[in-house]
Amino acid sequence: MPELPEVETVRAGLEPLLTDRDIIGVICHRSSLRYPLPDLSLLQGKRVKAVRRRAKYLLFDIEDANTERAKVLVWHLGMTGQFHVLPEQAKCGLHEHVCFNLSDGQSLRYRDARRFGYAGLLYADKLEQHAWFAALGPEPLSDTFGVEYLAKACAGRKAPVKNVIMDAGIVVGVGNIYASESLFRAGIHPTRAAGRISTERLQLLVKVIRQVLREAIDAGGSTISDFVHADGKPGYFAHSFQVYGRQGERCFACDKLIKRISQAGRSTFYCSNCQH
C-alpha cells in the first residue's frame, strides 16, 4: 500500500497539473470501488483550487461559485490506486474507473486494479470531524510531532515501539517500510516497549523519522508492487533501504545478518547487533 512519501509524491505531481483547472466533464465506468463512489457529477463545472494531503489521503479543494461552502474531494489510493494526467483524447486504460476532463484539454484518470481505493465528497469545514480524519494523529513532518509529544504518547506503554509509531492515532504516515528504516537509524530494537525508551532516544527517533520520510519524498517514494507517480515513473527510495526486505543479507553498518520477525501481522526487518 502506498505510504506517506508515495502519496506526497503523487500530490506534488498532480498539484501543478490540476490547480486552477475547471472540471468540464466526469466519466465513471463503475459506481463503486472499495465503497460506493460519491456523486462525482456534482464536480462538473467546478474548479480545482489546490491539491493537498492529510495522512495517506489526497485532498482536492473544490471551488463552487454557487455556494460559499467549499467542498473537498477526498481520495485514498488503497493498494493499487494510481492517478495519471493524460490528453483528453487518450484511450481509456486497463482498470481505469474514473475520468475527469479538464479545461486545458487534459484529463485526470484514476486506475485501480484491485479496487481497494475509495473517495468521498465532503464539506471543507467539516473535514476534520469526519470519521476518516477525526482520530488521526499529527503529521510527522509538522511541528506538533516533537519529542515532547512522542514521549507523552509513549509514556507507560508496553506495546512495541514499532507498533506505536505505526499507529495513525499517534502519528500518521509512518508505515511499515519507514518504521523499520527509522528504528534502524535510531538504533532502537523494534520490539522494545515504547514506555522504556529514554527521552534522548525518542528525540533521535523523531529526527530520523523526519529524515527518512524527507529522503523518501525526495527520491519519489518506494516502488513496492504497483506504486508509480502521476507521470507513470517509479519511486527510487527502495534503492536506499538499509534493512527493509534485506533478511539474511549483511548489515551495512556491522556486517551481521539482517533479521525478520512478524509484528501485528507485518514484517519487521532489523539488525540485532545495531538495534537495542
Image (spheres, grey):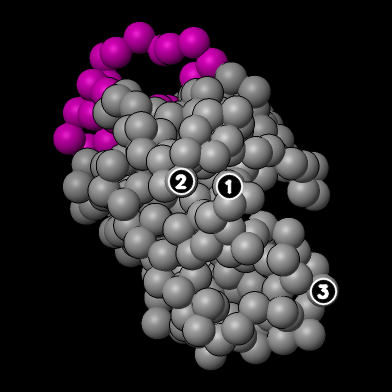
Q: Amino acid at mark 3?
A: Lys
Q: Amino acid at mark 1?
A: Cys
Regarding residue 39, the answer to whether it shows in the image is no
Q: Quadrant of residue 266?
A: top right
> Residue, x 22% and y 41% (percent of image)?
17
> Residue, x 68% and y 38% (percent of image)?
260
Task: Give the main secondary structure of the magenta stretch.
Answer: strand
Mark 3 vs mark 2, CA separation in Å: 29 Å
The image's mark for residue 271 is 1
Q: Position of residue 102 (x, y in %)?
A: 27, 36
Q: Which residue is mark 2?
A: 254
Q: What span is colored magenta in the figure? A: 82-109
Q: Which residue is mark 3?
A: 158
- Say which label, 3 or 2, has the lower sequence index: 3
Seen in the picture, residue 85 relative to 131 is either above or below; the reply is above
Regarding residue 92, the answer to whether it shows in the image is yes
Q: Position of residue 73 (x, y in %)?
A: 49, 53
Instruction: Assess whether mark 1 and mark 3 are in contact (beta carbons under 8 angstroms).
Output: no
Q: Is residue 180 left or right of residue 211?
A: right
- Say which label, 3 or 1, has the lower sequence index: 3
> Residue, x 73% and y 59% (percent of image)?
191
What secondary structure is marked by label 1?
Answer: loop
Q: Amino acid at mark 2?
A: Cys
Q: Position of residue 170 (x, y in %)?
A: 64, 73
Q: Is residue 128 magenta?
A: no
Q: Position of residue 142 (x, y in %)?
A: 40, 75
> Residue, x 40% and y 71% (percent of image)?
207
Q: Is label 3 or label 2 in front? A: 2
